[in-house]
Image (cartoon, rainbow, N blue to C red):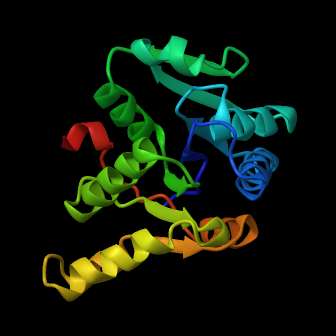
Amino acid sequence: MTRITTVCVYCGSAEPAPPAHVRAAQDLGRSLAERGITTIFGGGRVGMMGHLADAALAAGGKVIGIIPRHLEDVEVGHTGVSDLRIVSSMHERKEMMASLADAFIVLPGGLGTLDETLEILTWRQLGLHDNGIILLDVDGYWRPLNDLIHSVVAQGYAAGSALDLFHTATSVAAALDLLEHMEQPAAAALTERM
């Protein structure tokens, strides 16, 4: 087991985002940078993505953005990040983000964020990785997803162990506390297992 040095943050790119969500993104970006943890994100400079990256950069952090070529113009790739990688597809984006991450934190976002979250949960369930996943439940944003996952288990479509695939935190401080107690598993890279 080794210390977590990179965190993939899934979050929305829509504007405007609720002020509490923006504050959480900024607080998370700054806090990761202050801890010397590299932030990996979807590469956009707008919405929650932009707030997260800008705060991490302002605090002296390293930020890696990964954006598909077809979204670079739509989301306006964040050229100020430490490392902006332009890939050919959404699938390549998600695989690269996951392969670089020691852990995952999910801020509020839209359907893309929901897609990324369910996929990384599924990959963990399938044993493709064993990295920690934290839902940052700002103002109860992820409560409906949490309820849905409990319902899936209650209806017998997933084992009770599905509830152990992730943690929920209601504040950035609580998410960072969970992160501090996680260690990166010394296992094969995600891309080697796919």
Instruction: Give percent across and percent down for residue 136.
Output: 59, 64
Q: Is residue 74 left or right of residue 119?
A: right
Instruction: Give percent across and percent down for residue 36.
Output: 74, 45
Q: Is residue 102 left or right of residue 150?
A: right
Residue at 33% x, 35% y is: 95
Q: In this view, does 144 lie to the left or right of 35?
A: left
Instruction: Give percent across and percent down for residue 172.
Output: 72, 64
Snapshot quadrant of residue 62:
top right
135 up-or-down from 128: above or below: below
- 155 and 186: which is toward the camera: 155
- 162 and 16: which is toward the camera: 16
Q: Quadrant of the C terminus?
A: top left
Residue at 70% x, 54% y is: 21
47 up-or-down from 162: above or below: above
Q: In this view, does 34 lie to the left or right of 164?
A: right
Residue at 48% x, 22% y is: 67
163 up-or-down from 48: above or below: below
* Callout count: 0
Instruction: Give percent across and percent down for residue 91.
Output: 29, 30
Residue at 50% x, 25% y is: 66
